[in-house]
Image: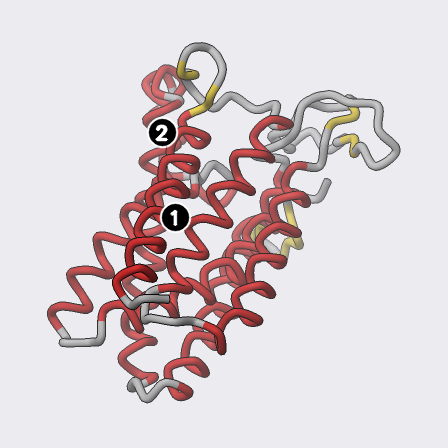
Amino acid sequence: MFPVLFEIGPVTVYTYGFFVAAGALAAIVFARSQARRWGIDPDRITDLCFFLVIAAIVGSRLFYVAINGDYFIANPLEVFKIWSGGLVFYGGFVAALMTAVIFIRAHSLPFWLTADIAAMAVPLGHAFGRLGCFFAGCCHGSQCDLPWAVTFHDAHSLAPLNTPVHPTQLYSAAANLAIFGLLLLLRSKRRFEGQLFLYYVMFYGIARSFIEIYRGDDRGAFLAGVLSVSQVMGLSAAAAALVLMIWMLQKQGK
């Protein structure tokens, strides 16, 4: 597609980086609005978001490097070129979650309420990020002959050229927007603090595991030759979130 958004003299703005930045901004603006809604200092949420964005980028890049170790051992400087694509969501999720726990406890924020705010903001920002993936060609789908298949022609694209593939990046962007919409609808129906976060973990884990079926990029080793690392993590997290939600609802007698 269009890995480079525009160039001004020696300055090159990559489409992937632009959409990642736009997603982070959208998530922060939305998180601030929800903080005000639930009586939390929005400036403190902005500080949290700043650290989460950094942690997510570092964690997702390290995870990507880990599952593509042979390539980066041979090309060590490529590790730092995140503007051209190559971030694995679950690596960023784990790093951001650890960072959030530390920040929330350090600043005495209500843990599960803050988690609910983040759970609604993350899929909004993630949807923008997946659009960036689409333009960069990373996270591409497997070959197909469906009417909506896409073909990449730009020599700088990370997707295979001149081959129709599933637009898995757009599948993921649509799934994230759907999750964002569902969480907005469920916001007023939650029974306990943290329920939106558990919903998010369930919905995303299931959606990601399904979309993985149509991915065509290298995603490292597969469990029993069937499930990718992301599918194992997604399904495990979804199952754990479901069990915890049932336990919390039973605890409340609902």
Residue 238 pos. (x, y %): 41, 43
User: What is the spatial separation of the Cα atoms under label 2 and label 1, in whole angstroms?
Assistant: 31 Å
User: Relative to residue 75, is residue 202 depicted above or below?
Assistant: below
**Residue 10 can be seen, yes or no:** no
**In the rendered image, which residue does mark 2 sit on?**
65
Farthest residue to the right: give it.
147
Q: Identity of the amino acid at label 1? A: Leu
What residue lies at 30% left-to-right and 71% top-to-bottom? Answer: 114
Q: Position of residue 250 (x, y in %)?
A: 31, 59
Q: Residue at x 47, y 24 (%)?
A: 219
Dot 1: element: helix
Which of 57 and 242 lies nearest the eye of the viewer?
242
Category of crowding for the residue at label 1, using alpha-carbon neighbours closer than 10 angstroms: few (below 14), some (14–19), many (at least 20): some
Question: Left or right: where does residue 82 sit relative to residue 171?
Answer: left
User: What residue type is disc 2 on?
Assistant: Val
Q: Which residue is at the front of the view, 132 or 104?
A: 104
Residue located beneath label 1 in the image? 242
Residue shown at the point (27%, 54%) measured from the top left: 97
Task: Of the two numbered discs 2 and 1 on the same chain, state the one appearing first in sequence.
Answer: 2
Q: Is residue 48 above or below residue 227?
A: below
